[in-house]
Image: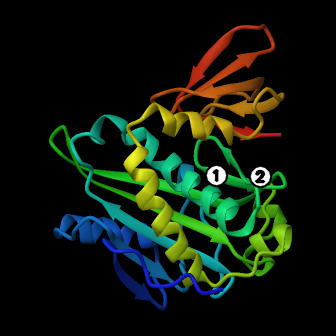
Amino acid sequence: MDSGPAPRGFQHILLPETNSTNDDCLRLADAGAPDGTVVRALHQSSGRGRGGRSWFSRPEASLTFSVLLRPEAREAPYLTRFALLGCLALTRVLFRNFSVEAQIKWPNDVLLAGKKVCGVLTETLWQGEVPSAVVFGMGVNLSDEALPPQAETIFPAGSLAGLAGIRVSAQDLLNLLLFELAQARQELPTAGFIEEVNARLAFRGEWVSLRRNADAPRRARPISVAEDGSLWAEGEDGLTARFYSAEISG
């Protein structure tokens, strides 16, 4: 498909190969690069996800990129929503352009048919107590060639082509994503943003294994994402608890 020209307000840098597009964007941010700087790599040799884990990618089978955003004053209180911003943008792209329903796996993944097709990693640069830049990287599995060896996965992985028959080039998908990112960013500080995230929340009301940091996993049922991006979940004892960082597995 042809997604047309890239949305205004974004400056693209395309690299044949790099260690990490997030690292590249962080260096550019430190050097004064503007809001909307996008670094896409055909191949990442040291891409990373949450908790220091690596993100597996293959040229032509993955979309791997990072976006540099300069938070506005109205966005600064909502930094914890930026990972959800990337997830929400992809679910909108898939529904509006391919009629495919995807879900957001809190805190930073997108699922199709119960399998992970996208991960988001956000990192923030600070000047004192003021956030000067937010960089978030996204990795999207376009085809099954992008999938890591099964032994290396914590959560089952899938691809857009393998799970939904979506055939789209990395550049076309990036253009679609940037358009939706720009639109969703306007809604970031609103109650409607979290409402839409909750409408797409994976495992809502289902029993899952929830592991917080090095704690032993516990059975819990996700209830909703709170205004600050944390997760409310109900334990087997019937009590609700708030999680700011945790890993969900089925």
Q: Mark 1 points at which residue?
A: 109
202 left or right of 194? Answer: right
Based on the displayed image, in which of its 4 quarters is residue 197 positioned? top right
The foreground one among 192 and 21 is: 192
Q: Can residue 148 be seen by looking at this rendering?
A: no
Residue found 64% across the figure and 78% down from its top = 62
Mark 1 vs mark 2: give the one in front. 1
Please rate how many residues cluster around mark 2, counting C-alpha atoms within 10 Å: few if below 14, some from 14 to 19, many from 20.
Answer: some
Residue found 18% across the figure and 37% down from its top = 129
Q: Where does the image place residue 120, in percent across and percent down from the top left?
A: 54, 56
Query: Is the residue 33 above or below the residue 58 in the image?
Result: above
The foreground one among 133 and 191 is: 191
Q: Where does the image place residue 102, in percent across and percent down from the top left?
A: 73, 54
Residue found 68% across the figure and 45% down from its top = 105
Please rate how many residues cluster around mark 1, counting C-alpha atoms within 10 Å: few if below 14, some from 14 to 19, many from 20.
Answer: many
Q: What residue type is labelled 1?
A: Asp
Mark 2 residue element:
loop
Residue found 57% across the figure and 33% down from its top = 195
